Image (tube, helix red, strand yellow):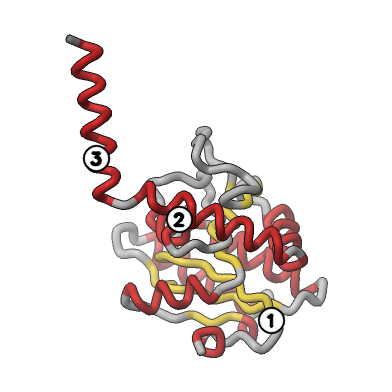
């Protein structure tokens, strides 16, 4: 049902992108990667979940217009579905039904990205960009697949690999599911208590 709502035909590879539209999230890079897949005759539907411009930066509106023009210039309109604003239940349903979630941040993956946290929480197979600073819990090939930032060719290659390898998609999904409980707020609070207790003992 949700795949049909996303505009994915039977057998199509469903790629989801989640979050507000701004330049740092690299949606233009994803569009160029999707265009490469189109040239390679890989059947794929791109689902833009949320897909509205954030209002905290006026340049976001300009970027959203760029994205709209790019969709047409790359002849991708028939292969893209944009949801607009959704409640949490619908976001969850769309992300869970996608074959992969693509998050090509220009500054690399990090835990400050709510869209990454959501994709981990919903046990998605994630392709994202290499963190700018090493994050030990984010393991390339285990709980996500990393590609260089601002590199449409590398992103297309990663998406092609995920399209061809169902076992890898399952592995990444299972890895995300295993990592997700570390973001439970009660567990985070307990971990902070343990950390500060350790600090007090060290400084005593």
The reply, left or right, for residue 29 in relation to residue 180 is right
**Residue extending farthest right:** 40
Image position of 45 with respect to 146: above or below: below
- CA separation in Å, label 3 and label 2: 22 Å
Task: Give neighbour class at mark 1: few <14, some 14-19, many 20+ (Cα, 10 Å).
Answer: some
Query: Which residue is denoted by mark 2 in the rendering?
Result: 116
Q: Secondary structure at mark 1?
A: loop
Query: Left or right: 167 with respect to 46?
Result: right
Of residues 154 and 62, the one nearer the viewer is 154
Q: Earlier in the sequence, mark 1 or mark 2?
A: 1
Q: Which mark lies nearer to you, 3 or 2?
A: 3
Closer to the chain start, of discs 1 and 3, is 1
Q: Disc 3 or 2, which lies upstream in sequence?
A: 2
The residue wearing badge 3 is 190
> What is the spatial separation of the Cα atoms under label 1 and label 2, in whole angstroms?
23 Å
Q: Which mark is residue 167?
A: none
Query: Toward the viewer: 151 or 103?
Result: 103
Of the numbered discs in the image, which one, if any, rests on residue 12? 1
């Amino acid at each position: 049902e949700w795949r049909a709502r996303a505009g994915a035909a039977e057998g199509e590879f469903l790629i989801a992108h989640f979050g507000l539209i701004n330049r740092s999230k690299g949606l233009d890079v994803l569009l160029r990667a999707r265009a490469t897949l189109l040239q390679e005759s890989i059947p794929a539907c791109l689902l833009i979940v949320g897909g509205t411009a954030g209002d905290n930066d006026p340049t976001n509106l300009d970027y959203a217009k760029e994205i709209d023009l790019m969709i047409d210039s790359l002849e991708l309109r028939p292969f893209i579905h944009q949801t607009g604003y959704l409640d949490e239940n619908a976001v969850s349903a769309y992300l869970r039904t996608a074959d992969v979630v693509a998050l090509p941040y220009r500054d690399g993956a990090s835990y400050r990205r709510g869209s990454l946290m959501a994709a981990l929480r919903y046990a998605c197979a994630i392709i994202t960009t290499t963190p700018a600073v090493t994050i030990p819990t984010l393991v390339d090939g285990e709980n996500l697949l990393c590609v260089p930032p601002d590199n449409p060719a590398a992103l297309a290659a990663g998406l092609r690999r995920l399209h061809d390898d169902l076992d890898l998609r399952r592995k990444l999904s299972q890895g995300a599911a295993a990592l997700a409980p570390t973001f439970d707020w009660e567990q985070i609070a307990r971990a902070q208590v343990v950390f500060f207790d350790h600090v007090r003992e060290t400084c005593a």
